[in-house]
Image (cartoon, grey):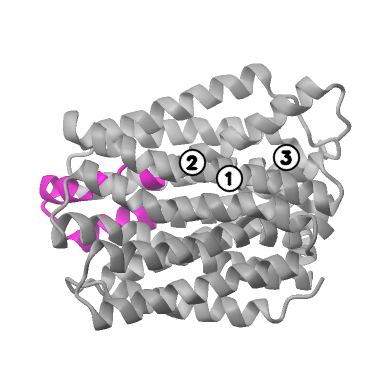
Amino acid sequence: MKKSNNTSYSLILLLAIGLMTVGQVPAGIYLPSMISMRHFFHVSHGHIQYVLGIYLFMYGVSQLIYGPLSDYYGRKSTVIIGLVICIFGSLCSIFSKDILEMYLGSALQGIGLGSVAVVSTAILRDLYDDNKRLLAASSYRAAAVIVTPLAAPILGGYLQTHLGWQATFGFSMFYALLILVLIMMLFTETNTRKKIRTFSFAHIIKNYTIVIKSPNFITFGGCRILALSGGTAYAATAPFLFQTLLHFSPITYAWTAAIPASGFFIGALSVKKLGKQLAPKKIVNIGALFLLVGGVSLLVLNTVFSLSVLTIVVPMLIYMCGSGIIFPSAMTGAILPLGMVAGTAAAFIGSLQNLGRGFFSSFVGYFHNNSIMPLALTVVVLSLLCFFVSLKLKD
């Protein structure tokens, strides 16, 4: 896309960043309410963790459809449909009377917001054609995106304390509605290569085949999936660790849990500077090393010492810093060669990463045993896998 002027160009970039944050809100804002929701629905903590798992699963699967749709029919119409579905899902969650209705609401939210993950990534690829500019834009988006997971649990803690868990889902609904209005009023289509023709299953398969055959997509995408999965497993387990085992209030938990998340912000911001001197491969290698140090430290410290704030926060801060480094640099390495099918590529990597995040958050919940060990072991395995895959990366 060629920019007509700096103002419109910057506006589209800001809207792309705003779109991505919409998908982050439901995954974080209700976390301080998990204990309250467990009592309201009369279920175990593991069953409440499935709310996040279901959201992420549907968030991931739906992207496989939204990617080709956005390539053929444009970014704007695709994301509008998704945001409308999300709003209906939020309403379902707010008025849930049992856990199955909550699962349905989370599923609808995930189905709808899969569109924002695809479109926000594809927009960046529409705007930038070279490695350094795409990497810089991706680092800005990653830094901005992590503000949402930092702020959402804190906001959720206050909403839970003063208004109850339903208010957290109400905020998600109104935020999605706000972004919907802004997109309808201000967004200019960026997909100049969109194909206005019959949506063909054969063309979907062809585009996904192109993506799968890209070696960079497989290796860079694999690193991104593994890195984000560990962070999500922590986010899903943190309410139990801080509120149940360490007896923190929802607000204190939210502020404490935000410390490791700030590592992602630091890591993402560092990518722009690293990108001036290093290729995406080298940057991902550095991030993978941070993951490994953080993951091993989490396991060792909580094996040798009693569970405490420091044994949780310090290792996860290191881990999340590595995840923040990998997040934009791995995306750049994965989709840069795939400009003609950027929507499909963004959909595929987004789908896989959220399926991984949903699986591992539910996995840790399934093996819940009133300790940090299921989380620590999961994070170690994921960090080891990411480190070894990063050694296979090519420029």
Residue 389 higher or lower than 265, as above or below: below
Residue 55 in the figure: left or right of residue 82: left
Q: Amino acid at mark 3?
A: Ile
Q: Nearer the viewer, mark 2 or mark 3?
A: 2
How far is disc 2 from disc 3 in space, using C-alphas?
Answer: 20 Å
Q: Name the mark on residue 143.
A: 1
How far is disc 2 from disc 1 in space, using C-alphas?
Answer: 7 Å
Q: Is residue 31 visible?
A: no
> SS class of the residue under badge 3?
helix
Q: Name the mark on residue 123.
A: 3
In contact (CB < 8 Å): disc 2 and disc 1: yes
- Rendering quarter of residue 369: bottom left
Task: Sort mark 3 into few (<14), some (14-19) or many (20+) by Cα contacts within 10 Å.
Answer: many
Q: Tell me the magenta residue range.
A: 27-54
> SS class of the residue under badge 1?
helix
Q: Amino acid at mark 2?
A: Val
Q: Is residue 361 visible?
A: yes
Residue 52 in the figure: left or right of residue 141: left
